[in-house]
Image (cartoon, grey):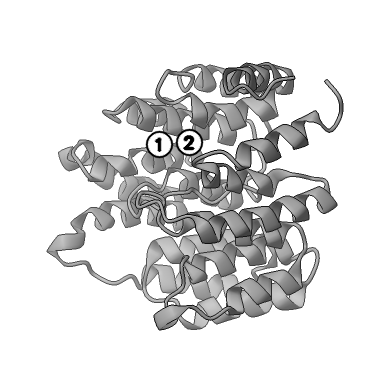
Amino acid sequence: MRPNDSSRRSTSLMHRPGAARSSPWLVVDRDTVRALRLAEQAVRLGRACHHPHLLPEPLTAAVQALGWAGAARRVTEVLGETYPNGLYPFDSEHAQVEAAAGLWPHDPGLAGQLVDDVLLRLPGDVARAARLLVGLRPHGGERRSHIEQLAFRRRRYDGFDWGLEYRDGVLLSLLTVDPVAARKRLDEVVASPELSEPPIFRSVGGAALAYAALGDDEEARSVARRAKHEERRAEAFAQLAAYAGCLPSDRVPVPLHDDLIDITLLARRLAALLSPPSGPDLPKARALLAEALTPDGWHHAVPVLAAIDPDAVLRVRDAVFAHLGLSD
């Protein structure tokens, strides 16, 4: 295979129906010039995407990609565009945070400005506070302590938002410094039989990551298996594998569908930031990944497989491109 075949094939794939589903993967490209070109392509595709099940996240992912490509000017231009009725076709707050995470090495002044702007509007929402902490990473300083205080001053939910109480309980257990208090909080959340019922069962993956962060691998696996849907179980095990393997969590693409209750990915990023493992355990990661490689959940496992065994994922890529008719 020629060196640039992968780039050409990826670009060809983006022009096919549903191409916006591919756009967030562009954020992982380490070739800055190519990453910027693909990020611009993602912006154009994101603007054109009106799929009812994708919501605004393709364009959010495109802004994230611009940030990691170091395109500070383009980030401000896209975020500063005006739209009909003053409504953004994407989650502007989420886009700011993810763009800032990528801009720290390139333009720390703009990154800090984006974070401060979000911080001024941050309500008592634990998930948003957790997302902002992940975006800050080692650049937190005084901002970090302020965000953590805001997280614990969370608002109470009404009857229509009762599933978010469980989500917040999981995230707060990760934010709790005292491991005994964190375990007590987490056990109380997981003990509820409602955690296995819709829609709350979508928080199961996050709870599994929280147990892994507390060092209880057996309970982490047990909780992950409580997910009733194969795809949810696969996602939980894939993120557990990523955590065990100490895979970088800073360049994780924005999910194309922003689920308020499914915090599996956010929990892994928060756990990696606040309670990182002492070192990668690849045998454990492979064992966890084996439970994620299922017919309905393989797509959660492939990015982890790419980091653990790149040759294997190249073989998978060739098979997929051949199936789509994109092979040479």
- The kind of residue on which mark 2 rests is Ala
Q: Residue furthest left?
A: 159
Q: Nearer the viewer, residue 81 or 134?
A: 81
Q: Which mark is residue 208?
A: 1
Is residue 177 visible in this depiction of the protein?
no
- Left/right of residue 229 with respect to residue 276 in the rendered view: left
Q: Position of residue 281 (x, y in %)?
A: 64, 26
- Left/right of residue 106 with respect to residue 276 in the rendered view: right
Q: Judge the density around disc 1: few (<14), some (14-19), many (≥20) Cα neighbours within 10 Å.
A: many
Q: Judge the density around disc 2: few (<14), some (14-19), many (≥20) Cα neighbours within 10 Å.
A: many
Which structural element holds mark 2?
Answer: helix
- Left/right of residue 82 with respect to residue 179 in the rendered view: right
Cα–Cα span, label 1 and label 2 = 6 Å
- Left/right of residue 99 with respect to residue 167 in the rendered view: right
Q: What residue sits right under mark 2 in the picture?
A: 212
Q: Position of residue 123 (x, y in %)?
A: 39, 76
- The kind of residue on which mark 1 rests is Ala
Q: Which mark is residue 87?
A: none
Q: Quadrant of residue 232?
A: top left
Q: Nearer the viewer, residue 260 or 60?
A: 60
Q: Position of residue 216 (x, y in %)?
A: 45, 32
Which structural element holds mark 1?
Answer: helix
At 58% from the left and 78% from the top, the residue drawn is: 81
Q: Is residue 244 above or below residue 131?
A: above
Marks 1 and 2: which is nearer the front? Answer: 1
Quadrant into which the C terminus falls? top right
Mark 1–mark 2 CB contact (< 8 Å): yes
